[in-house]
Image (cartoon, rainbow, N blue to C red):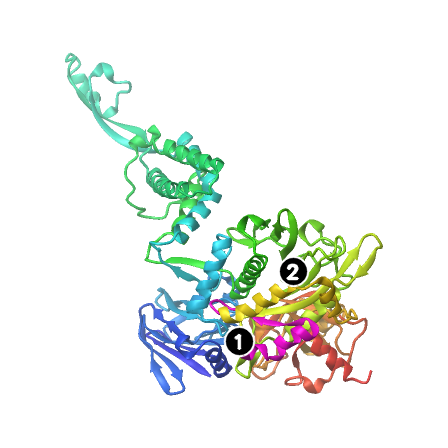
Amino acid sequence: MELLTIKHNDFTMSVECNKFDAIWTKAKSNIGEQSLLSNYSWTEGVVSVVRETEAGKQEILQGEQAPAVFFDNADYPIWIEFEDRVKDAQFGSELQGENDKFSFRRGILAGFLNYGNEIGRSEINVIYKTKEGATHRFTFSFEVLSTKLDYHEHWRSIIEDIEAEYRMLSLDFMRRTFHGFAPDPNGDTPELIWWSVFAGEQEKFIRACKSIIDRPRHRLHGHESYKRADRLTIVPRTIENELAEHRKESGHLYRVEEQLQTNDTQENRFLKFALAQITGKYEALKHRIDGINTISEIKKQEMADTLKTLQHLGHNPFFRTVGRYKGMSQESMVLQKATGYSQVYRTWSLLHRGYSLYDGLYRLQTKDIATLYEIWCFIEVSHIVKDQLHLQDEDVEHRNRMEMNGVFTWELGKGEHSRILFKKDNVELAELIYNPKNTDSENNNVGMKNLVVPTVPQKPDIVLQLTKNDLQQGMKMTYLFDAKYRIDGRQNGVDTPPDDAVNQMHRYRDAIYYKDYDSHALKKEVIGGYILFPGDGETADVEVSKFYKTIKKVNIGAFPLRPKDNHNRQLLEHFIEQLIQTKSHETIANIIPQKGAFVEVGNRVLIGLVGDNNRGRAAKDKFLDSTATLYYTGSKFPTTIALQDLHFFMPYIKGKGVRDVYEITRVRTISAKEAKQQEGEEGVNDIRLAFELRFVRRQYPCYQPIDTSKMAFNTFIDTTFDELLGILLEQKI
């Protein structure tokens, strides 16, 4: 289905999506049509932008809102047909993986976009060259919305809640979407983000400034002066005749030009400017932070020392002969590569490009919405536990630690590094841990003490352990929560959680045991498992839903949890309150005995036919000996398969069956010619999908046949490991 047509002087761009009607209906049901709006903008050369709607064609105007086109977790084929004067074109993303999804042939640039769980503002950048040799860049900007949460309202709430607990945890970089931040006169967010960034850079920045002052870059400067003959150290050839003529005149002045070294360079001017700007902002923020009552004297002294150092550097005599910075007329290699200067420029760029106003917006990238939702759920559960235990801030011990996850990004520490201990009068009442360890092989210092998984790894997002005075010493009541940014559908006016997520909680509960180190026996300690998902619905309808009623029946179920939905949040509050107040023997009496069925966590897997034609016999041999690294499709590939949901691949060897599991590390486009198809095959110039693979494991000891009638085009099956088991069981093996 064609959604968007952009007519440009040099090309026509078409945006398609085969499943858009279903996506729009889902988003409309979850959020409301009034919130499904996007602001569009583009660079010069556009003749018209037209969106296809149910009512017909709708022209979109520059900078105005219109119904959204782009949503999360959807494939969008892009076709750009250029005029004859264009000889080459490419997709211009900052991410190489996105560019690899596009190819240019016969005047057409084609590929696809899928934003996964990333929402926010994004751009389509196209770089093309004309036959005259000119290079052009076109940018089309829009917003990518969520089908589950209101981007314009809920996303902002999630960010604010996370930032209130963990400053900068929500931020990321090298993402496909970004977000605009404007300064808030009543808030501290932009300034504190700046403060946090500079805190990690200040030592390197100060060292770089000192290094430059000690060993600055100079330039030669011509200087004109008039001197008597006896003051000349060197006699320039230009005044030899004049000197001979006036040799008897001791007071005669001779005009001489000297080449002197000067510190007044563009780079040193930039250093002076950057140092002054950073010092001024640091001083202003320090003054505000000094007024916080809870700040320690040690911290105050550290800030005072830093400010003193910055001010001392700025007053160095070195800068007396350095002029005012007026900008760079051209790119400076000294700033980019020279010792000291490059670090000053890097620090300035980080602060300026990402977190200060230049074009009227802060342009920040955040973690994907699924990760943000998971962190937000952890924070919400911690707040609920604290409230239901009637504790004060001083009764909550945080061991939460953020850990560096990249060049300039942070993640919440896992296991023991994210432990929150709830105590009253030094008596432990509960503990909450984010992403704990789940196997004996993992280091104990990153997990929950005494929790073991004898079989395959199990990874619930949140683990709550309650300590009660009627329990035997060392034993805790354990409850598992898993945050899933997914909605399966809607029944009786209520959003429903995905079935596989609920089934996964059964596996979590049945696989995790408590290890009694006195008897070395494994005991069942996990009481129940619960899904947290961004569902909506009237509270009365939620209470009679199947996923909620099963909580009382089998201690497995789900809670809808989304920002600003206090009514459904109360269901979780009441539940945790009951967990705390109910006597242990009453809880245990209602536990259904568990059999401990150990099943690997289901993930989506693509089964693809490997025949003798797939890059020849050599490719098949690689799959047979589990060394294959590439699989490509034929001319047909089912449009119903969501590429972003695929994590694994299982080759179906014709005549044998399935056995091995590969991880899909990358999906890209490839031409049939590049794939080295057989000569004479139809459509040899069309585009195929190529899956780059990494061998993971053998799922079965020997090949297992499957029901090939379930294969689309007799070639593909999009399934899960759980569904695969069902497919195999249907065979009479």
Please rate how many residues cluster around mark 1, counting C-alpha atoms within 10 Å: few if below 14, some from 14 to 19, many from 20. Answer: some
Which amino acid lies under the numbered mark 2 shown in the image of this protein?
Val
Q: Which residues are magenta?
A: 536-565
419 left or right of 187? right
Between the C-alphas of marks 1 and 2, the distance is 25 Å
Q: With respect to residue 494, does 476 lie above or below? A: above
Q: Kindly identify which residue carries mark 1.
A: 539
| Disc ID at residue 312 | none
Circle 1: element type: helix
Locate residue 403, reporting x and y percent: 57, 50
Q: Decide which of 715, 495 is in the foreground and name it.
A: 495
Above or below, comparing residue 313 to residue 199 in the picture: above
- Name the residue tied to disc 2: 463
| Residue at position x 33%, y 77% in the image | 60
Q: Amino acid at mark 1?
A: Thr
Kindly indicate the quadrant of the structure image that contains residue 254: top left
Seen in the image, is 692 located left or right of residue 338?
A: right
Q: Is residue 617 visible?
A: yes
